[in-house]
Amino acid sequence: MARRKYVVGNWKMNGLRESLDEAGAIFAAAAEHPSVDVALCPPFTLVGAMAAAAPGAAVGGQDCHAAASGAYTGSVAAAMLVDAGARIVIVGHSERREGCGESDADVKAKAEAGLGAGLDVILCVGEPRKIRESGGAIDFVLAQVRESLPDSFDPTRLAIAYEPIWAIGTGLVPTTEDVAAMHGSIRAALSERIGAGAEKMRLLYGGSVNGDNAAELLGAGDVDGALVGGASLTAGKFLPIVAAGAALS
Ligand code: PGA
């Protein structure tokens, strides 16, 4: 099955209102590559303004709370993201799993909340360096997939991002063979779990993706896109990744 390439920028805790021009430049140029789905996930503070400035563009949040509302100081509900104009939400990023102590059960609840509110979800998984070195990366990641996936979901609305923690922001990337092996294993596990719908799910690679390595990473087996951190902050760095996706489409 042909799956559209999906290139998503995760701005993390970067960006002020002055950065909206950069987002506008990214969305305008990305429109020249209609075969690729492009999204940007800025900090919460910019979601509304970015979505308003780029009607039709896919803007997302980087997290959401599992609950619909309530006494959760500092948190944002999925419906609030929708209200601000978001269409997608990232859940389970390793910076939240590790930095904020989020468990697989938390990530599953957040994914369910996002889907329930009408957001498409990007669910992140990935192993720490020690696990990669011990040879246990595939087992570790498949356990995360098993435990973090909602019980039932529309496979066209949930993407999985494989992001080895040791590759995030480090300039290190796994070999293409290792990426393909991981993505193939995730796809196989999804097939066992949901059957033919697994072929509709997009599996993104994330971790030090840039304009130089994008063609190779996006061309690896079962890689349907990229989740990009540092290189998504400027049009100059992000657009070559989008173009690499278009060239493979
Ligand atoms: P990076 O981040 O591209 O800066 O390595 C990727 C991510 O954390 O999503």
Image: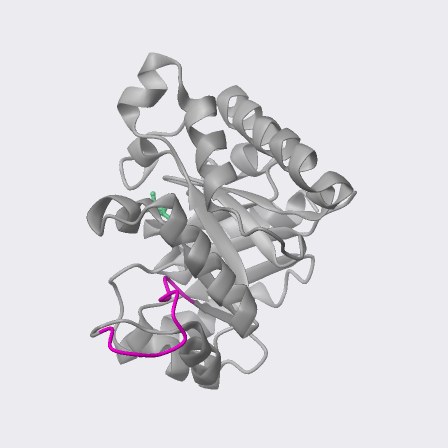
Tell me which segment is drawn in magenta: 61-72
The residue drawn where x is 58% and y is 54% is 158
Q: Give the percent coordinates (x, y) of residue 3.
A: 71, 48
Q: Give the percent coordinates (x, y) of residue 22.
A: 38, 70
Q: Give the percent coordinates (x, y) of residue 38.
A: 55, 61
Q: Residue furthest top?
A: 134
Q: Quadrant of residue 219?
A: top right
Colour approach in the figure: one colour
Q: Up-down: is 73 above or below 120?
A: below
Q: Quadrant of the N terminus?
A: top right
Q: Up-down: is 129 above or below 12?
A: above
The residue drawn where x is 28% and y is 51% is 96
Left or right of residue 24, residue 42 in this image:
left
Decide whether residue 87 is among the magenta residues. no
The residue drawn where x is 25% and y is 64% is 14
Left or right of residue 154, residue 185 in this image:
left
The answer to whether one can see residue 131 in this image is: yes
Q: Up-down: is 19 above or below 214?
A: below
Left or right of residue 81, residue 33 in this image:
right
